[in-house]
Image (cartoon, rainbow, N blue to C red):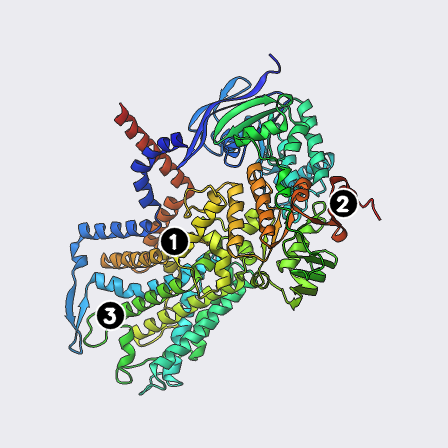
Amino acid sequence: MATSQNLLQPKQTTGGIVTKIFSKQIVIPLIALMALVLFNLIADPSFFHITLKETNDGYNVLAGNIISVIDYGSELAILAIGMTLVTSSSGGQDISVGATIAIAGSVVMRVLCGENSAPTELQSSIIVAFIVAVIVSMLFGAFNGVLVAYFKIQPMVATLIMFTAGRSIAGWINENKIMNISPECSREFAYFGNNIPGIPVPTPVFIAAACMIIIALVLKFTNLRLYSQSVGINPNSSKLNGINPQTVKLITYVILGVCVAVAGFIKVSRLSTINYSTIGKDIEMDVILAVALGGNPLGGGKFNITASIIGAYVIQMLTTTLTKYDVKSTEIPAYKAIVVIILVVVSAPVVRQKMTQLKKKLTASKVGKEVS
Amino acid sequence: MEKSSLLEMRGICKYFPNVRALEQVDFTLREGEIHALMGENGAGKSTLIKVLTGVYPKDGGEIRLSGKHVSIRSPQDAQNAGISTVYQEITLCPNLTVAENMFIGRTKGQLTNWKKINTHAGELLDSLGIPALPQQQLGSCSIAVQQMVAIARAVDMECKVLILDEPTSSLDEQEVEKLFKLMLSLKKKGVGIIFVTHFLEQVYEVCDRITVLRDGQLVGEYIIEDLPRVKLVSKMLGKELDDMADIKSDADTAKIDYSSTPVYEAQKLAGTTGIKPFDFAIRKGEVNGFTGLLGSGRSECVRAIYGADKVTGGIVKMDGKQINITKPLDAMKHGIFYLAEDRKRDGIVGDLSVRENIILALQVLKGFFRPISRAQAEAFADEYIKLLKIKTASSDTPIKSLSGGNQQKVILARWLLANPIYLILDEPTRGIDIGTKIEIQKLVLKLAAEGKSVTFISSEIDEMLRTCSRLIVMRDGRVVGELSGEDLTQNKIMATIAGGES
């Protein structure tokens, strides 16, 4: 026993700390974040300038690229929370979030505007509209969840249904009318996607922060993490340990539904109107990318929501950076594809193995030198 | 000199982070020899095999095949060099057909003649007496048949060295016999066979030589005649073995009162898994067992008790009160726990830590909204790691990186922590080393002495005889007999299983 410990000690001290840091999942999105920050610092430090800008109403609000990253990253971060849970429990992703955002947004508008596409006053309070949207989104989440958990359809295929049908349903809810809530009708409605007068930080940032706090509390005071991970890793033994894998999967899809409702609500509030075919378009890909960038195994099991959230802001920062350098919005996906390629290649087992071998060689040669 | 050596491994070293898996191990295999590789779990048997087959790169040493130096960097290299392996865990693809599994990765041309392959596979299966059809999906076969298909695949490849890593752990006696016949005929053809197993009897039945490893180091190579069993066991453990026969006598003091109300009682319990409705009862402090051939329904019976499979009828009582068990959670709430037969599939949650695996059942019992605090969980884990002598780097280590025996101990810890009233252990000793096997048997008797009821199932009748005071014998999904007291002998059990009586 003593000999084996002696033999192992040098490894633990030299390579040990480095390996320990690099084995942490959160390192992946942090490295990506630092790379982007570094790029912007070198290319144009003005990216980080934050200014106070006066709005038409005479209030001061924060402006700048970094602010818009944090602002527009809110929806992504909120959705990344739900997507991480869904990925963990069901080993697949929900590709219908963009379409169900359209539904949630449409429900909000329907409740607030009623039949009238440009109402002079709101038909009900904003909180009621929000709650109805949450309930409807939870139902659609449950629909996906039932298909995945009870009918055992692969998540991508199951959610393809809502992906296809969602925007049509969204349009149908408001009879395809362009709904519009003018400032004359309700000033408050726009607060949730923009700024509350007198507060310079955009409201979506607070909403996202609230969501993060809620999920942190849920994970602390329930066994959601343990259950979801167990079910994602081994549904058979989870079942024999008294966990119902179907229920757990269903719950995660319903939670994602809530996230979708919040994101949809922010999105319609930003513009005070809804375009059924463009709202939240392709956002599912960004969200899945955020989960992947967070180093979460897309095949389910262990997860780290903080890493996913950082991943979400990294994606948003990439988008903002590209927009700043006048990359056309139609070309942005091509750049994101590059990120995907790097990500996939770096996290591939083959590359990882090669990396550890390389690291071993380096430490071995170092030790060799010290000895000689 | 005797027969020429076929395979020589010299000074093999292999290190994992924090573990010295192999240190200067030598191994020699001669032509036409069946060579047992023995050692406790974690002794380095599987690692040595994996180094030989190119799964792990070696950190030192040399491998020679027929006197020539070879470098094996991948399983493909090993296969090309004529080294075929059948692993302990089935490594085939359950969603492909039997024939596809037998030929996958070794069809030469780009075009594959499936008709020819199916015919060839059929012939091979027939000649080996394996009850499977070439076009059948592998997943639909029993574990035993899957294992035999894996052997058929290895045998069909032009192999000089055949490695069997725990091939018999999921086979029943007749199947083992078939396998041995096959091994002996391969031996005559000059194939060298490395046989890794935990079954001592089997080693003495077919092997010529034994190499013993312990803690990653070579203990020695012996000709089988020179190494009686007791010596082999003490070499493996590195100490003199407690007399195994003693296990029972020192714990059997608790007399069971058969007139008392059973802790658990089932009447005409029926399920959907092909077992006939059966009656069953167990009393406080009793250890009983289900025995029978593989597929006789012994696992299905206990799964029905636990509610793991759908229960379709019957009355279940605990302490005389009628209860309803339709799902595992119901059983758990009544203090009935079940350690499943297939550890990898139904037991461990691989990526989760040892700690999380230990607290899992207790946590589920406490409920979704009452998580066990981190400090408390760590205390529980440390307590059971110490109590059951679980070898793990820390309680944070993922369970999948532990050896089989230690994984099993973690699962045992999980159920013990949840404080069982009635514990069902389905093949808890399968595929683990002899030291741990004895520990588990002792533990079972200790639990019984503490007043818990245990059902213990094992393919090794020896183990059942040592631990159980009553045996329920099954054949073809039916309870065909119950043995206790003086009837508990090997012969009597065999006779009942075979159906010689009544």
Can residue B348 be seen? no
Q: Are marks 3 and 2 in contact (CB under 8 Å)?
A: no
Classify mark 1: helix, strand or loop. helix
Residue A277 on image: x %, y %: 39, 70
Identify the amino acid type marked 1.
Ala
Q: Residue furthest right?
A: B502
Decide: is B237 above or below B144. above
Q: Quadrant of residue B467?
A: top right
Classify mark 2: helix, strand or loop. helix
Crowding at dot 2, Cα within 10 Å, few <14 / some 14-19 / many 20+, comes out as few
* Residue to which mark 1 is pinned: A292
Q: Are marks 2 and 1 in contact (CB under 8 Å)?
A: no
* Residue to which mark 2 is pinned: B487
Q: Relative to residue A180, is residue A50 drawn left or right?
A: left
Marks 2 and 1, how far apart at CA: 62 Å
Residue B491 on image: x %, y %: 77, 40
Instruction: Give the mark toward the camera: 3 or 2.
Output: 2
Q: Quadrant of residue B236?
A: top right
* Quadrant of image for the N terminus of chain B: top right
Marks 1 and 3, how far apart at CA: 27 Å
**Same chain, labels 2 and 1:** no
Crowding at dot 3, Cα within 10 Å, few <14 / some 14-19 / many 20+, comes out as many
**Same chain, labels 1 and 3:** yes
Can residue B257 be seen? yes
Tag of residue A202: 3
Decide: is B136 above or below A150. above
- Please give the chain letter of the residue carrying mark 1: A
Instruction: Give the mark toward the camera: 2 or 1.
Output: 2
